[in-house]
Image (cartoon, rainbow, N blue to C red):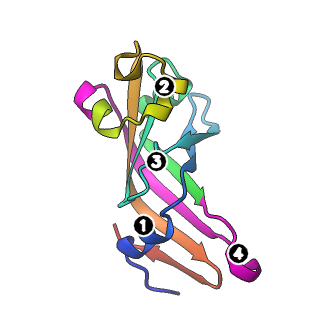
């Protein structure tokens, strides 16, 4: 087991933009979908994702805030396996425009054409409670 810190892991995750977010549905099934972290790659255990308030993801989180995130980096030099990160966390739905502005990037207008004024906009905030990683032959957990 390696002993990475959250700072080490954040540096290693530096260019990973997309995560897979898993929630539990009202039928007690798991639902997973890709989410962009809006270019926020200075990761420290908190992740932010925009959605529409009417999305199933938001309803799932309101019912059960326990979620999972998975990240995968690019393969390393000479065929080294990529970095894999699994996060268990608690999510909350944020509906505050100041928070929207803090995490907004212009590329999001592709999905939310009126920017932070898009009707029904919601921000999903995931706070990590357990982080496990695999990096080549190293694996371990990072204390949050």
What residue did someone put label 3 on?
A: 39
Q: Tell me the tag on residue 109.
A: 2
Observer-side mark, 2 or 4, equals 2
Asked whether the residues under the numbered discs 1 and 2 touch, taking CB atoms below 8 Å apart as contact, a structural biologist would say no
Along the polypeptide, which appears first: circle 1 or circle 2?
1
Task: Give the farthest residue toward the right.
Answer: 79
Separation of residues labelled 3 and 4 (CA atoms): 23 Å
User: Which mark sits nearer the N-terminus, 2 or 4?
Assistant: 4
Camera-nearest label, 3 or 1: 3
User: Residue 142 is drawn in which quadrant?
Assistant: bottom left
- At 49% from the left edge and 34% from the top edge, which residue is drawn? 107
- Closer-to-camera residue (80/139): 80
> Dot 1 corresponds to which residue?
10
* Mark 4–mark 1 distance (CA, rounded to whole Å): 18 Å
The earlier-in-sequence mark between 4 and 1 is 1
CA separation in Å, label 2 and label 3: 14 Å
């Amino acid at each position: 087991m390696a002993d990475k810190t959250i700072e080490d892991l954040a540096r290693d995750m530096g260019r990973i933009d997309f995560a897979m977010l898993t929630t539990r549905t009202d039928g007690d099934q798991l639902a997973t979908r890709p989410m962009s972290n809006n270019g926020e790659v200075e990761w420290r255990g908190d992740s932010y994702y925009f959605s529409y308030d009417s999305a199933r993801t938001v309803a799932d989180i309101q019912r059960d805030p326990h979620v999972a995130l998975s990240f995968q980096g690019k393969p390393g030099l000479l065929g080294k396996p990529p970095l894999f990160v699994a996060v268990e966390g608690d999510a909350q739905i944020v509906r505050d425009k100041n928070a929207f502005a803090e995490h907004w990037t212009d590329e999001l207008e592709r999905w939310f054409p009126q920017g932070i004024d898009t009707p029904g906009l919601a921000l999903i905030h995931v706070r990590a409670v357990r982080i496990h990683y695999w990096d080549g032959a190293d694996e371990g957990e990072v204390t949050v």
